[in-house]
Image (cartoon, rainbow, N blue to C red):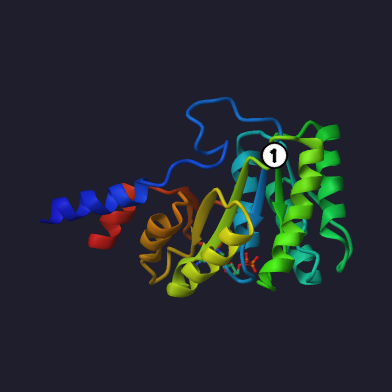
Amino acid sequence: MRAALKQTLVELLQSPQARGRLWGANGAPPPKPAVILVLGVNGTGKTTTIAKLAHAYAREGERVVIAAGDTFRAAAIEQIKEWGERVGADVVAHQQGADPGAVVFDAMGAAESRGADAVIIDTAGRLHTKFNLMEELRKIRRIIERKEPDAPHEVLLVLDATIGQNALIQAKAFAEAAEVTSVCLTKLDGTSKGGIVFAICDQLKIPVRFVGTGEQADDLAPFSAESFVDALLR
Ligand code: GDP
């Protein structure tokens, strides 16, 4: 019974087909620069996840540009700058209240002139009306596409594992507003078991790619359906 249950759950988590061109591509050389658009509500761990991703690239000797596209909060801009220094990534930031599109434009330009391997783009972290969210993301995409017609290569949605059903509600809202290609589930180091990923995989068909397992730059792991289910059934 246990083995059958495990198999069913693992298959469910593995069922969403790859949507992005980076993490689903089987051995294909990554585009240069790889462009990753990161979405998520404030507090889910979006900034930390961006820092962790940048750190993973930098650790491999790759050059990363982070676009501080969440221009709504001054603290968010400062926080991402600090992370950039810590993990060795270039951060392109404007003042609070600036047009996120302008930040993305400059970041794409900086990536080009510096020969960056990856551009990681932060976006607004407030779940305002779906229409505004869609408009803002559409504009950002247009700016990205002007420089890199097949980018963004991944649209990563950051979800907090500790908020249960709310994560599904957030995922649905973002999936309706943008073509989300991947999910990162944060805070799996706490008491949460993150069972909500079953609903996300089943209902939204979006693959989970990463899990956040702590607050430090190294605390990001590729998602493994097998070990996730093992931990759940333990
Ligand atoms: P943002 O508002 O979505 O950008 O969220 P932050 O990146 O600022 O993270 C919010 C809080 O969650 C911070 O205190 C982070 O240290 C913490 N955090 C982020 N990811 C993780 C994780 O994987 N595990 C734990 N335990 N805390 C996390």
Q: Position of residue 155 (x, y in %)?
A: 61, 49
Is 230 positioned to the left or the right of 224 in the image? left
- Comparing 61 with 67, the one in front is 67
Q: Position of residue 137 (x, y in %)?
A: 72, 56
Q: Quadrant of the C terminus?
A: bottom left
Q: Secondary structure at mark 1?
A: loop
Crowding at dot 1, Cα within 10 Å, few <14 / some 14-19 / many 20+, comes out as many
Q: What is the three-letter code of the residue carrying label 1? A: Ala
Identified at 22% across, 48% down, the residue is 7
Q: Quadrant of residue 203?
A: bottom left
Q: Position of residue 162 (x, y in %)?
A: 45, 72
For ligand 1, the image quadrant comes to: bottom right
Image: 11 above or below 46: above
- Comparing 70 with 141, the one in front is 141
State how many labels appear: 1
Is 32 positioned to the left or the right of 158 in the image? right
Identified at 79% across, 31% down, the residue is 115
Q: Which residue is mark 1?
A: 151
**Residue 216 in view here:** no
- Comparing 183 with 68, the one in front is 183
Q: Position of residue 101 (x, y in %)?
A: 83, 54
Image: 21 above or below 224: above
- Comparing 217 with 35, the one in front is 35
Q: Quadrant of the N terminus?
A: bottom left
